Amino acid sequence: MTNIQKFLIGAVIVLGILVAITLPPSMEFYFDKKNHLNTNEKDLKDIAPEKETSEIVKEIIPTDNSQHEQSNTNLGEIYHNLENSVVQITSTVTETRSNIIINGNPLEQQSSRLGSGFVYDNEGHIITNNHVVSGVTNVDVTLSNGDTFIAKVVGTDEFNDIAVLQITDDYSNDPINPIPFTDSSQVKVGDQVIAIGNPFGLSNTMTTGIVSQIGRLLPNQEYGFSIPNIIQTDAAINPGNSGGPLLDDNGNLIGMNTAIESKVGEFTGVGFAIPSNDIKKVVPILIEKGEYDHPWLGISGTTLTPKLAEKLNLPKNFRGALINGVVKDGPADKAGIKDALYTSNREIASADIVVSIDGTPVKRIDDLIAYVSENKSVGDKISLQIYRDGNVIDIDMELSKRPTNSK
């Protein structure tokens, strides 16, 4: 026998030994695993608590699916019910291009402005934002079925950004349904909301979200006044949604979408809506008179911050609305409220601070504006408590009509 043959025989023997050592454990592991799985399946059938848990899981899953389906069904029903209540508004405006001169005159061109609106009553009145129809007297109102009617602007409230239109064409053959209102003072943070409108001209688009805050103060830079009690939402609002309804989860109106907080011109997670209670208060007067008279204090102010309170040597956590300006011959000026005094560095050295109005505490400038807007009319009297130079004094005044830019 050669050395090569001896080597091959030895290699075969060693290989056989290795296989004998390795194979049984490997097979044992496989069968043990299989037996273990079978045993567990048997045990699961025999152990009552685990069986009950399994049944509970089976019961929960269909319930959750049912709730999800019910939620989707509710949204579908709301959309279907309000499909003939939300409209698209198109206005044609003339714009002057001062940088283009033709025959010595600036170029004038027409452009379309798109927005949304909703049906207010059975008389053909449509509610929208003032900024959707400002500068025009007639607009086109398009229903969800595509039918378009001419509507005239019958009243505007520039300060609350509310406008009322009335369809002048015959719409008797079209189903136009008013949207039901609800009390916006009952809205809470976290409530589910629905927005329907025409973003980017995409008619009757529905989005959903929640109320992310209430009682916001929305500055109106064009007119120099702020809109109080604004509802903040994270439901997607985009250009074209202006004037459309913000609804609760029952399809009732809680507000009108009017603005977004954005640096890019499109929705970034924060939208603002005028509360339904303000709309209910203003719209009947707009229909009757064409305008709404706002009560006016004749002041400008800001919320007293801890840093500002410290500079004025006020007690810690002192709260109130600091008056930094008084309009000459306005109600506040006539009542004796003073302008703030400033240092050479334009820092406030002293100022009147409103701490209550008609006995209601004022912690922010928002509180003062909201109270007057909600509870007072032109000609009403109010009583302010003013903190001045370490003393609290009472000042009474009569509210006058807020002046407009055009008057």
Image (cartoon, rainbow, N blue to C red):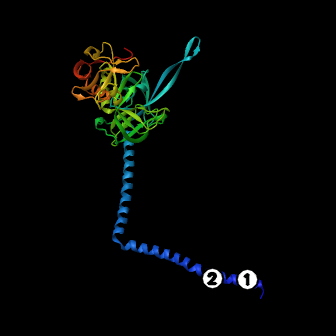
Decide if residue 178 is in sight here.
no
Asked which quadrant contains residue 193, the reply is top left
* 67 lies above or below 145: below
Q: Quadrant of the C terminus?
A: top left
**Mark 2 crowd level (few <14, some 14–19, many ≥20, 10 Å Cα):** few
Furthest-right residue in this view: 2
Q: Nearer the viewer, residue 124 or 163?
A: 163
* 75 lies above or below 325: below
Label 2 near label 1: C-beta < 8 Å?
A: no
Q: Amino acid at mark 1?
A: Phe
Image position, residue 30 (x, y; %): 53, 75
Q: Quadrant of the N terminus?
A: bottom right
Q: Residue 32 vs residue 324: left or right?
A: right
Helix, strand or loop under label 2 = helix
Asked which quadrant contains residue 116, the reply is top left
Q: What residue sits right under mark 2 in the picture?
A: 17
Image position, residue 368 (x, y; %): 29, 26
- Give the residue at x 42% y 25%: 131
Asked which quadrant contains residue 51, the reply is bottom left
**Mark 1 crowd level (few <14, some 14–19, many ≥20, 10 Å Cα):** few
Helix, strand or loop under label 1 = helix
Q: Nearer the viewer, residue 298 or 386?
A: 386
Mark before the other along the chain sequence, 1 or 2: 1
Image position, residue 227 (x, y; %): 35, 27
Q: What residue sits right under mark 1 in the picture?
A: 7
* 314 lies above or below 4: above
Q: Amino acid at mark 2?
A: Ile
Q: Nearer the viewer, residue 349 or 64?
A: 349
